[in-house]
Amino acid sequence: MKCLVAGHVVRDIIRKGGKTLERLGGGAYHSALALSKFCDVEILTSFADLPEEWVNQLESIGKLRVVPSDSTTTYELTYLDGNTRRLKLLDRASPLEELPPKRYDVVLLNPVASEISPDVVTLARERFSLVAADLQGFIRLPDPGPVSYTPVDGSVFRGLSILHSDAVEFSYLRNFSPADVEVLLISDGPREERAFLRGKEHSFRPLPRKVDESTGAGDVFLGSFTGFYLSCPFVQSLKRAVAFTALFLERRSADFAPDEVNELALEVEVKRV
């Protein structure tokens, strides 16, 4: 099974607890990391320069398709606590204006700085049967400085298989109903979260975990849910994706056994609203 993940990989400068570290990040990286556990992944991205170790890390996940760029998308993330952060865009790579002329079983669009246009979303929806997307990069303005948002016309997402958003980002979506997509996932940090299957609402809670940062949680959740949804029913996919994400946050890695995910998923309760 072949999957394409599109979006900028990112140089993350993370400030927390008085310390600063640089790490490979971005929605495409985290979603591809999760999705690679389910299928052969290709990553369509753009950057100018990354440490060799980071490139090797990406190539261990899947095949890289790199659009040439003079810059690398760079974010500064300042954590106030494990779930609250200030986000600043420092630099941005080239946009992703086309999709490879290949057939994929899954296409996951996860931009972080408006690098994917609505036209590319339309193209993906027309060409591929299972298309997932994350709202975050479609509403972020690509201007350097503190991240700001702009409303987006949600009609471009109609007919997608899966759309993910956090609760704040979702308020920027206009002209959209949960029934416009097959699955809508709305994250809200450690609080109760919502998921819709063909417009029917369900609620669930993330598994409680003490972590000092939550970078990549929503992207891993989207990537793992998409992978599980290839072969599992909606509620089962939701429970397992919650468990998968909790393990990732604990270990900052996806190197855990499927049995660990399945066992932890038994602790997740999903309710029909």
Image (spheres, helix red, strand yellow):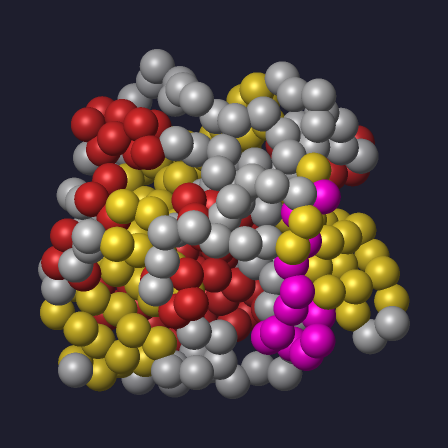
> Residue 84's spot in the image, x, y percent?
61, 74
Q: What residue is drawn where x is 43% and y is 22%?
A: 97
Q: Nearer the viewer, residue 31 or 159?
A: 159
> Residue 7's spot in the image, x, y percent?
50, 36
Q: What residue is drawn where x is 59% and y is 75%?
A: 83
Looking at the image, the residue that sits furthest to the top is 101
Determine whether 96 is above or below 24 in the image. above
Number of numbered tags placed on the structure image: 0
Part of the protein shown in magenta: 79-90
**Residue 263 at least partly seen:** no
Magenta stretch contains residue 81 = yes
Q: What residue is drawn where x is 71% and y is 27%?
A: 71
Q: What residue is drawn where x is 30% and y is 22%?
A: 103
> Residue 6's spot in the image, x, y percent?
46, 34
The quadrant in which the C terminus is found is bottom left
Q: Nearer the viewer, residue 136 or 47?
A: 136
Q: Hey, which quadrant is residue 250 in on the image?
A: bottom right
Magenta stretch contains residue 82 = yes
Q: Hey, which quadrant is residue 122 in on the image?
A: top left
152 sits to left or right of 11? left
> Residue 163's spot in the image, x, y percent?
30, 52
Magenta: main secondary structure:
strand
**Residue 15 at least partly seen:** yes
The quadrant in which the N terminus is found is top left
109 sits to left or right of 246? left
